[in-house]
Image (spheres, grey):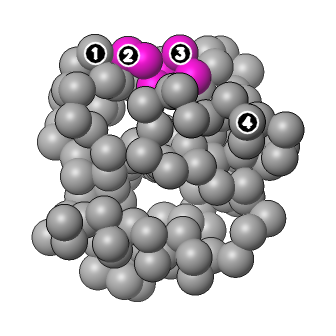
Amino acid sequence: MKKILIIDDEEHIREHYQNLLSEKGFSVDTAEDGTSGLEKFRAGEYDLVLLDVNMPDRSGLEVLKDIKAVKDGQVVFLLTAYEEYKRNFASLYAEEYFTKDKKIEILLRRIKEHLEE
């Protein structure tokens, strides 16, 4: 079973994605901020990380750099509510980015494609 870590400070977002991904057969862990998310990442093995860009304790971009320092090949999808971050993601080492208002079907399809590679 593929394992996914969701790091997002918004509880309803974490729960929504956790429920959807669990229904699709994934094992899902969640973390409410960047610090606890990085701790969970270091303690576990994850096939994919869904990472919010804006969090109160640490920027998702900082957490992304730390994740890649721990495991260079880690697949990370960035989540954001802000479309203006779009132009910055090409150089950030994230495999994908999604605005939270996009259709969940697209996100689910891209997760499946990445995990089947």
Q: Label 4: how many residues lie within 10 Å, few (<14), some (14-19) or many (20+)?
A: few
Q: Label 1: how many residues lie within 10 Å, few (<14), some (14-19) or many (20+)?
A: few
Magenta span? 61-66
How far apart, in angstroms, are the residues tagged by discs 3 and 2?
Answer: 6 Å
Residue pointed to by mark 2: 66
Label 2 element class: helix
Residue pointed to by mark 4: 87
Residue pointed to by mark 1: 69
Residue pointed to by mark 3: 62
Place of residue 27 in the rendered image (x, y in percent of width and height, measured from the top left): 27, 65
Mark 2–mark 1 CB contact (< 8 Å) = yes
How far apart, in angstroms, are the residues tagged by discs 3 and 4?
Answer: 17 Å
Mark 3–mark 1 CB contact (< 8 Å) = no
Which amino acid type corresponds to the residue marked 4 in the rendered image?
A: Arg
Mark 3–mark 2 CB contact (< 8 Å) = yes
Total count of labels:
4
Label 3 element class: helix
Q: Quadrant of the N terminus?
A: bottom left
Sequence-wise first label, 3 or 1: 3
